[in-house]
Each structure stands twice: as structure tokens, then as C-alpha cells.
Image (cartoon, helix red, strand yellow):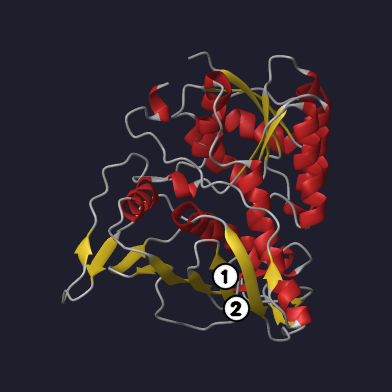
Amino acid sequence: MKPVGIGVIGCGNISAAYLKAARSFPILDIRALGDARPEAAEARAAEFGGRARPVAEILADPDIEIVLNLTIPAVHVEVGLRIVEAGKHAYSEKPLGIDYRDARRLTDAAAARGVRIGCAPDTFLGGSHQAARAFVDAGHLGQPIGGTAFFMCPGHERWHPDPAFYYKTGGGPMLDMGPYYITDLVNLLGPVARVAGLSPEPRRQRTITSAPRNGETIEVEVPTHVAGAIQFANGAVVNMAMSFDVAAHKHLPLEIYGTEGSLVVPDPNYFGGEVAFRRKGEPDWSPVEVTQPYADGNHRSLGLADMAAAIRANRPHRASGDLALHVLEVMEAFGRSNATGRFVEIETAPARPAPLDADAPLDRL
């Protein structure tokens, strides 16, 4: 299969994971690296190969078919629109945007231009999450009834060297971590129908305890503890909490409950992990065998590789713009529900992404 030319815009921290993983996928031909700070692109080019180029050159290069957008969330849509206007496919780091209506402009523009939008996270394509998907699809759970989804920690100011952006508009635990959990839940259960959300008033200031800004104060602009329930179109109800305010807890990241038993799904921020099932009436949990690929490392370019292969094969790609837009609408609905005291009905309803074909791994294309 002919490789697909890839240009990268945004050479910050996350770009290293993408560029390292991209080496495993021959279909990805990284042709250019760009950043508003040219020195950042030059550093990544020296580290991983490729050529540092101005963003305008990347958008004008006819040999580049997909532009990987690794800029900060606040400009994901702005940069995405430039990519689409240049007639190129766009694949974005999560979230698709920080405002649902704004992000919809991007997906509508791409549809009108006849180009594709892809978006992280792609961890749901990891072997363990695909094993969980196959287990659900085989009917072992029976009728899905509900589940739980929890990410809770004391806050990123404890360890991140520059954590202020996590507490500004576009940050917070829901937009930061929610994409992993909600995307995996849609992969397992299908689209969300409605949301009920609650959030206490956040602490308006937080103190950094990590170097080099230890002792500085952060102004908080976003909810830092968001909880509620998601009801899926199939009727299942999942309790969810995303928080930067919890000192400690014993909840597992993801559990799915059905009429015939319960399934433990590993942390959706990773591609691998243990999958376990406990059948109704049985005393113990049993491991679910993981035979699918991509459960053994950080494959942060997997969704991009699937998109590139889909372009060549003229099929839908899995980490799609429609899926990411749905996830963004669901995340935003928690805040709308909290503000109004009402359920929020979800407008978008993407199809579940197709299971990854274990017999045609993308690292062999």
C-alpha cells in the first residue's frame, strides 16, 4: 500500500509520542514538521528525522495528504479549518475543539470540501479495548445495563512543570481526560442519548507544588470536579466522575455491567491492560484473553495510521471526526445539565466504529 504523506503542525510535548509511534507504521510518511516556534520543529526534526518547514509550506505541499494537528486545544478548530481550506485531511489531538458549535464548523467544512477529519484518542483501538469490544459484541454480558467511569486525582499542579493551562478555559478534567473514557464507552456501547451532570463550585485558586513554579498561584476558570450519568441509545446508564479534587479513591477506571455479568475494562488512557469478567453466580473474576494487536505499548499514531489506510482503501476510518464531535457534545452536556438542572439530549449519533481487523495489522501495510 502506497504510503501517505503526513505533515505535522505543533511540535510540543505530545508530538514525541506520535513521532516515535509513527515509525511502526510504514503507511505513514512523515514529510514535514512545523510549529509557530521554528526551533521546536527543528528540535523534533533532529530527534526523529523529517524536515522542519514553515506551516504555510506544509499546507501548500501537494505531496502531503494528511496534516496532523498537535497544537493546543484552544486552536484545534482554527488550525483544522486552515488544513481543510488547503484541501487536506486533518487528524487532531484530542479534543476536537473546546466548543461543540465551533467544532461542528470544522466537520461541516470538511464535509463540504470532501476531506476527512480524524481525532484522538485512538486508545480504544488498542488490543485490550478491542478484546473488551469483541467480548461485548459476542453477547457474553447479555443486555448491557450500566457501568462506571472514573478518573479522579488531586490535580496536575503537583507534578506538571507548567500546569496553569489545565485550569483555564478549554482545560479541566472533563476536556482533559473525558475523551478517553467517553470514546471507549461509545466503542463498547454505542452512541450517547442524554446526559445528566453536576459540578460543585471549584476552588478559585490553586497553588503549584511542582518545580520550577513551586509556590505560584493558579487562577481557576473551569469546573474541577464533574460528575453525573450518561444514558446510551441502547438504554444502558453509566455513572461518571472526572476530577482534579480527589485525594484518593479505590474505583477502577471502567466497568461495564450486563444481565449476565460484569466486565472490567482497563484504563482508556492506555492501549493495553487486563480485561476481566465475572459471570453472574460465579465467585471469582476470570481474565479475558487479549489476542488483538497493539496492547503492548504506546501506539499514539494508530488512529492516524488507520485513517491513512482508510484513505487508500476508500473505507471509513475509525477515530473519526463524527465520533470526536459526538464525544465533545457529550462532555459539554455535563456543564449544560449542571447549569439548567435538566437532562441534556444529545443531537449527534455516530455509528460505533468498526472493530479493528486483527488479521490485517496496520504495522504491516
Q: Secondary structure at mark 1?
A: strand
State left or right for residue 178 relative to residue 126. Answer: right
Q: Does residue 95 appear in this view?
A: no
Q: What residue did someone put label 2 on?
A: 227
State which quarter of the image contains the C terminus: top left
Q: Does residue 73 appear in this view?
A: yes
- Residue 111 at x, y = what percent? 75, 33
Q: Secondary structure at mark 2?
A: strand
Badge 1 density bin: few <14, some 14–19, many ≥20, Cα 10 Å: many
| Label disc, if present, on residue 328 of the rendered structure | none
State left or right for residue 110 relative to residue 307. Answer: right
State left or right for residue 184 relative to residue 44. Answer: left
Q: Residue 87's image quarter?
A: top right
How many numbered circles does the render carry? 2
Kind of residue sitting beneath label 2? Ala
- Residue 108 at x, y = what percent? 79, 40
Towards the viewer: 360 or 192: 192
Q: What residue did someone put label 1 on?
A: 230
Towards the viewer: 99 or 348: 348
Q: CA distance from mark 1 to mark 2?
A: 10 Å
